[in-house]
Amino acid sequence: MHVQAATPAQHDEQARYREHLARELSQFIEGRAAEMASVSEDVAPLMDAISGLVTGGKRLRALFCYWGWRGAGGDILGPEAVQAGVALELFQGAALIHDDIIDRSDIRRGGPSVHRRFGQLHRDRGWALDEERFGQAAAILTGDLCLSFCEEAFTAIGPAAGSTTSARRIFNTMRAEVMAGQYLDILEEVAGPLRPRGEAVAAAANVIRYKSAKYSTEHPLAIGGALAGADEVLLAAYSRFSLPLGEAFQLRDDVLGVFGDPGTTGKPAGDDLREGKRTVLVAYALERSTAEGAALLEASLGRQDLTDDDVERLRAVIATSGALDATEALIDNLSTRAFDALGELPVPEDVRAALQSLGLAAVQRAA
């Protein structure tokens, strides 16, 4: 498939959308911070944590939403698309907060994760009782607050996001599926070791689809399209492009979670191994390794005390088993499917070029 590269005009439009989005997000957070300050000044750290998470970042979901909007005939920098981006960024913030608690991740984007920030606050103030419990509880509440805000922001779009609209249905489905996918992820960590190894790849692929792929690419693109009046035919075409792309995006994330450079990813080397993530990469390794290699991997997954040398040994097991090559081949296959479908999307060429640029950045990234 040949698609023209994004032009300077498209890059400029995307940059202006990001500027509009950043401004609206900032104004939204400032307004809610003022409201929360009327409750108590002690609530300020919750708002600071949310602000820190939604400031910056790749804006991947919001950008897919925007080009979905434009592909369905939406106006350049339409306020509905900007407001939908605000809601998606807030939902992403909530998901990251809760995900880091579940995964016991200390680092997010090169700094302390939200529950660790609250633990540090407890320590700095010399408060009573357990700092870890306080940190997790405060972060859960911060994530819940962020979820509440994302609903508020989406409702503010107006009639195009009303209770009976396609956009509302997709937004609701997206949020529910992420929670189900998160549960499947933690279930696989505890139940996976007891299941036949031959089922591990399919189980991990199902987690990828519902925990990440759909809400990273498929649903945001469809929400944007639905807000602009896309019919079911266009939404189905969007899905044929965006779902395999989202799965490739998460597979790339899983590879980086084991083999990524900490200086680039902002996370410790092999962090996914310490968290016990049973990704497709790990499932392939368990399926294809020698008995000794599989036993070492099983015994090591989820161990918080893994040293860098331990991580290197596990990387060697994964690579020599052929799991890394198999995962890269799957990324290539899914990417090909996605970009072939992109070539058939009934959208203007400038939108197609912008989506190709976004898609390539998603699957070829190093962080």
Image (spheres, grey):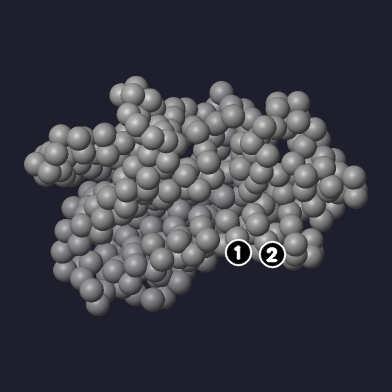
Query: Label 2 crowding class (10 Å Cα cut-off): few <14, some 14-19, many 20+?
Result: few
Q: Quadrant of residue 333?
A: bottom right
Q: Residue furthest left?
A: 38
**202 sits to left or right of 13:** right
Residue 349 placement (x, y as % from top left): 40, 54
Residue 268 placement (x, y as % from top left): 59, 29
Q: Residue furthest right?
A: 291
Q: Is residue 21 visible?
A: yes
**299 sits to left or right of 58:** right
Q: Which residue: 82% across, 56% down?
A: 287
Q: Which residue: 80% across, 33% down?
A: 313
**SS under mark 2:** helix
Tell me whether the residue at label 1 lies in contact with that at label 2, contact meaning CB atoms closer than 8 angstroms: yes
Q: Which mark is residue 206?
A: 1
Work out which quarter of the rendered image holds the C terminus and state it. Answer: top right
Residue 142 placement (x, y as % from top left): 31, 45
Q: Which residue: 27% across, 39% down?
A: 46
Separation of residues labelled 1 and 2 (CA atoms):
6 Å
Q: Quadrant of residue 84?
A: bottom left
Q: Amino acid at mark 1?
A: Asn
Q: Which mark is residue 202?
A: 2
